[in-house]
Image (spheres, rainbow, N blue to C red):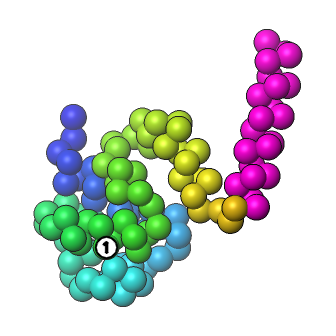
Amino acid sequence: MKDIKYIIADNVKLYRKKQNLTQFELAEKAELSVDSIKRIEHGSRTMSLENFMRIADALAVPLSYLLYENLNEIPITERILNILNSKSVNQQEYLVHMLEEMSLGLDKLL
């Protein structure tokens, strides 16, 4: 298994790039120095829990998402909750309704 600081480093870089953020932009959002972000992304620096939380907040991802070596390891319920939590109440209701309808259709097929 890969060292946790390298897993976090890879995930910070992955989520930063997914959001088309530069290291400078992430540093600004997280209120950290660019040098800190560079060292974190290279795995050459461990970070405090406070900075870990700042980065997760700046990337708008749950802390746990930065800890998984493989994104497929993230439990499906956690992934669904993260999607729902990022939506308005009306959007949540609509998504839950769609999921219920798809589930009923799937039950009929299988």
Say whether residue 69 is visible: yes
> On the rendered image, what quadrant is the N terminus found in?
top left
Q: Given the image, on which type of amino acid does mark 1 rest?
A: Arg
Q: Callout 1: 10 Å neighbours few (<14), some, many (20+)?
A: some
The quarter holding residue 110 reads top right
Say whether residue 72 is visible: no
| Above or below 33: residue 69 | above
Q: Residue at x 33, y 70 (%)?
A: 55
| Above or below 50: residue 101 | above
Residue 43 part of the magenta-drawn span: no
Q: Residue at x 75, y 52 (%)?
A: 93
* Residue nearest the viewer, comparing 65 with 87: 87
* Secondary element at image label 1: helix
> Is 41 on the left-hand or right-hand side of 3?
right
Q: Position of residue 12 (x, y in %)?
A: 35, 62
* Residue nearest the viewer, comparing 101 with 12: 101
Residue 96 part of the magenta-drawn span: yes
> Is 73 on the left-hand or right-hand side of 10?
right
Q: Residue at x 27, y 75 (%)?
A: 37
Q: Which residue is mark 1?
A: 54
Q: Main secondary structure of the magenta part?
A: helix
The magenta stretch spans which residues? Answer: 90-110
> Is 55 on the left-hand or right-hand side of 98?
left
The quarter holding residue 45 reads bottom left
Q: Position of residue 2 (x, y in %)?
A: 21, 41
Q: Position of residue 22 (x, y in %)?
A: 43, 79
Q: Residue furthest top?
A: 110
Q: Residue at x 77, y 28 (%)?
A: 103
